[in-house]
Amino acid sequence: MLSPERLALPDYEYLAQRHVLTYMEDAVCQLLENREDISQYGIARFFTDYFNSVCQGTHILFREFSFIQATPHNRASFLRAFWRCFRTVGKNGDLLTMREYHCLLQLLCPDFPLELTQKAARIVLMDDAMDCLMSFSDFLFAFQIQFYYSEFLESVAAIYQDLLSGKNPNTVIVPTSSSGQHRQRPALGDAGMLDGVEASLFYQRLENLCDRHKYSCPPPALVKEILSNVQRLTFYGFLVALSKHHGINQALGALPDKGDLMHDPAMDEELERLLVQVPGLVNSITATSEASCLPSRTPPRVGSPWKPLHRSRKLDAESDGSTEETDESET
Amino acid sequence: MAALPVPLPPTKMAAVEKRRPAVAPAANFPDSGRTSVSQAAAAAESEEDFLRQLGVTEMLRAALLKVLEIRPEEPIAFLAHYFENMGLRSPTNGGAGEPPGQLLLQQQRLGRALWHLRLAHHSQRTAFNNNVSVAYECLSASGRKKKPGLDGRTYSELLKRVCRDGGAPEEVVAPLLRKIQCRDHEAVPLGIFRTGMLSCFVLLEFVARAGALFQLLEDPGQAVADRRVGQAVLDTLEGALSAGDMATAPTHYLEAGSRLGPDNLARALDRAASGRRPSVPMAREEFLEKAAALFIAKVKPVG
């Protein structure tokens, strides 16, 4: 009884609003691709498992990008999966480059576009020094905004450009003494943008945008909160503020608060259990000693599967980064 | 790379189902053997046939109609549930090969009927009525009996299950069950079945609301309420329920609403609290029982 208005919607709108047909179609595609499973388990069982995995958010694992970004639920599920899979990176305190994060993303979604990862990295790094190292949580929260609100941000960028180039009759571009580090950043390629735009004007346009936007956008009240704290701001300044805002993260609902990002005892336990099962990783595990060696197996053991991976990938990137398969969509 | 701690999908099958080649995002049904347009068309046709032959098309159409009828808040979870129930229904689909015993069969039928009954809230009356009919059919189509139909025993059993699962205390709902139950050997017509189920669900909701009401009245520390206050609320409730017994329905609702309005209730509470005589506190069970009795008094007995 959370939203009784759903009962008054026309059929089509109700289905579209909840993406019922998207998932039904996908279920059929999956069924056609896995015909051998049906003879073994039955169709009803197949659909049960499919819809259950959609509910749990595991349905996006290893799927193509077009599916992963198809619905807000899929996007949130992907963010959650990314966080849960690679949380250990943050826990170990490893700093990775944009390309390395992109590799991690591609482990979950093989055709994940480099462009999106680059955009997310730009929010963190605030400039084009794209080979800088980033912490996991910085990247994750920037990536979340960029990925989840992708279409919204594109419209925001267009509005920002409009305001900068003075298309709005009310705009007066006043060169202000912005800090030096911002000056070096040719992010949107326009010289005028270095000074940013006036926040109140920007908000008016964004409020308008939120009203008619058919994709997800952040709660307007929170956008207002961000913009009412400053006089002027730049596009990336705005994105950084979005990515660091608690309330927006909560409203999106995919990730925990920043403080709890590394805290997931249930997952840690599960991870421990899985690591024990990997042969060769932990050499002295027997059935009887498993419990007794748990306490001793703290950071170094958890970290161990990551270190060689990290180092070898880094070497690759240093020696001949240009031959990487992900290079074709270079900006 | 293989050792990545990817959270595993719940079942083996689900894991397989996700490994889809990422090379053909444009094609609807990526098919490795497909090379030309004509082949693609043939494949699409055969896929359609395939789906129709298996009954997938029909199955999904029925599911979609159900979703539209009920409009669940969480349609995807609803669909998962829907297909799960369907899988249980047909033992050929992965069920155990052994034919289940009579008792088990009866339990399964009850479970299925209950599932249908709970699909829609009773305020969505059309959907609820449809589901009641389906549940009725589920129960009456028993292979064992010579004559189809629902007997009183099954009906009573179902009523009991509904109440038990509804979480209302037994002594609270017992008077209603006594009123609407049929004799074990009696045949239960659909009309009676429907009324019985509806009163049962409404009572459960009524009791749940009464429970919430009591929570407001009770002393946080002692889990009991002041008897005078509790009684005042009950009296107001009774007054509202008996208001305009003769009147036509719409005015009746209005009057009941006004009697239960905040000022009326506040006045009653005020009067009660100013009364001086000290009293035994009222426990939750007693409050619920008395509140339920007010409702049950309105239910017409069966037969």
Image (cartoon, rainbow, N blue to C red):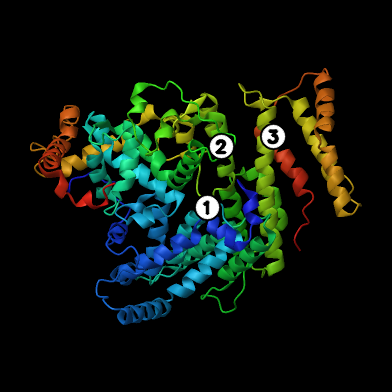
Residue in front for this viewpoint, A182 or B175: A182
Q: Earlier in the sequence, mark 3 or mark 1?
A: 1
Q: Position of residue B147 (x, y in %)?
A: 60, 78
Q: CA distance from mark 2 to mark 3?
A: 36 Å
Which image quadrant: the C terminus of chain B? Answer: bottom right
Residue A233 seen anywhere in this rendered image of the structure: yes
Are dots 1 and 2 on a single chain? no
Which tag is nearer the camera, tag 1 or tag 2? 2
Residue that mark 2 sits on: A220
Q: Which disc number belongs to residue B257?
A: none
Residue name at image x 36 percent, y 67 percent? A31
Which tag is nearer the camera, tag 2 or tag 3? 2
Q: Position of residue A50 (x, y in %)?
A: 39, 59
Q: Position of residue B62 (x, y in %)?
A: 52, 70
Residue A243 seen anywhere in this rendered image of the structure: no
Residue that mark 1 sits on: B74
Could you tell whether B222 is left or right of A104 in the image? right
The numbered mark 1 sits on a residue in which chain?
A: B
Residue that mark 3 sits on: B213
Residue placed furthest toward the right: B246
Residue name at image x 50 percent, y 46 percent? A216
